[in-house]
Structure formats: C-alpha cells, structure tokens
Image (cartoon, rainbow, N blue to C red):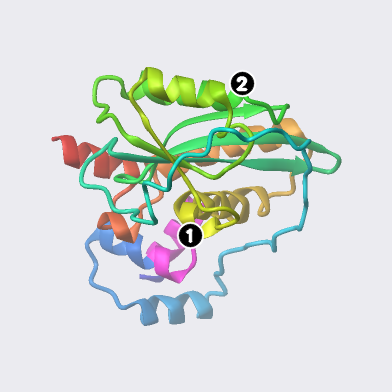
Amino acid sequence: MRNRIWELYEAFDHRFGYRRIQDELIRQDQWKVNHKKVYRLMDEMNLKAKIRRKRSTKLRMKKVMKPYIADNVLEQNFQAEKPNEKWVTDITYIIVGQEHRYLSTIMDLYTKEIIAYQISDSYDLTFVLDTVKEAVHKEKDAMGPPILHSDRGAQYTSEDYHNILADHHITPSMSGKGNCFDNACIESFFSHLKVEALYYYPIADIDEAQRITEEYIYFYNHQRAQRKLNRLTPVEYRNQAVA
C-alpha cells in the first residue's frame, strides 16, 4: 500500500492529502481502506499536501451605477436535479508581483464542472459576457434553460449582462448584499485553484500563472474526484448522468 500511496501522491503533483488519497485508492483500486490508516502511512512517509498560505490582496475598481438587481432565486439551494439546471458565476484575480489578470468562470451545480471561463487583463464587462456566450455555445444542445447566479458586481448588474441572459432565456439570480455565502460553491472552487495551484508553485510571471490556471481547470474537471459526486470527477459525473 505504501508504494501505491506514493504513486498517487506523485501522480497528483503532491496536491492531495490523506483524505483525497483515500478517495483515489477507493475509486481507482477499489481498496477498502480507512482514512486513519492512510493518514498514518502518509505521516510515516512524510507525505503532506504542500499548500501555501493565501496572500491578502485587494483590488479596486471604480464605483458604477447598479440599476439591474435580480432576486435571489437560488437562495443557497446548491442542489440540482440535472445538468444545466443551475449555474453560478463569479470573478477572481490571478496575481504575480505587480501584474494581475482576472478569471471569470461559470460552474454547473449538478456536476460542479467549470463549463466556461475567460481570462482577461481588464476587469471589464466584455470578458464576463464572453463567459456567458461560451457556456451557451457549449451547452446549447442541453440547456434547461438554467438559473445563473452571481453576486452584485458591476458587470452582473449591467444592462448588457441582463440583456444577454434574456436573449438566451436564462433566469438571473443574485446574492444578497455583501453575503458571500450565497455563492459559496464558486468561491470554494476559487479557493481550491489558488491553494492547490497558484499558491503552490513558484510562479515566474503572469503568463505562467495563466497557463497554470488553465491546466488546473482541466485537472479539476477531468481528474479531481469529489466525494459529493460519489468519488467521480465532474466530467465523469456528467457522462454518467446523460448515459
């Protein structure tokens, strides 16, 4: 078992701690193994998920008018009955030294898959609209149409954003003012991205940070199994649902 634990630890680039290693032993090898045993063996082998602490960085943008405020249709009900029933979206930053880029994503709450994302140098409306267009194009043959939940950021309260949702019969939903828990799922993804990838590697420049972000999103969708998905990856869970 020690050899297999080491193989998995290396295969996932030292990102996984004992609980996720246990998940992979069950998922890949069908081993019935207690998490305490995996913890003990990894501790004896000095194998730990190498995670850096988050850096506190605040980015500012100009205050703009926010005329389009949608109701909180989602109301923290993050369970979905089928793919493309409920989507959530948000923006985060990717920062290296004095350089930064912005990441806009949309997640399907049924599969927890990142179905669309855009990376931009500018914290503007265009890349948010492009994210919606990408999701619609990718899911056009299987759309509900969905609810799309966001916070009350300037991009999401713009007329153009609400127009594009209306054009595709997407129902807008927005968090309560200042309530980050209303969009907890997408915030959790951003945390995984930064802790498991961006704060783990010594990043040389912003272009490398963008490459690592894109690689991590692929890893998250195709390789990172989740307990809430019966130890399947988001893509595996989707394929199982539509089979």
Q: Which mark is residue 9?
A: 1
Q: Residue at x 42, y 25 (%)?
A: 165
The crowd level at tag 1 (other Cα within 10 Å; few <14, some 14-19, many 20+) is many
Residue 32, percent from left and from top: 23, 72
Q: Residue at x 57, y 55 (%)?
A: 191
Nearer to me, 223 or 206: 206
Q: Residue furthest right?
A: 98
Q: Position of residue 20 (x, y in %)?
A: 41, 63
Q: How many marks?
A: 2
Quadrant of res 84 = top left
Give the magenta range: 3-21
Above or below for 125 versus 186: above
Please name the residue shown 63% across and 62% down the image: 51
Q: CA distance from mark 1 to mark 2?
A: 40 Å
**Is residue 134 shown to the viewer in this render?**
no
Mark 2 lies on a secondary structure that is helix
Q: Is residue 34 above or below residue 101?
A: below
- Relative height, residue 12 to residue 84 (above, below): below
**Picture quadrant of residue 48:** bottom right
In the picture, measured across the screen, residue 15 lies left or right of residue 95, that is: left
Residue receiving disc 2: 126
Q: Report the predominant secondary structure element of the magenta stretch.
A: helix
| Image disc number at residue 190 | none
The answer to whether the residue labelled 1 contacts the one labelled 2, judged by CB atoms less than 8 Å apart, is no
* Label whose residue precedes the other's in the sequence (1 or 2): 1
Where does the C terminus fall, quadrant-wise? top left
- In magenta segment, residue 215: no
| Residue 226: x %, y % from top left | 35, 56
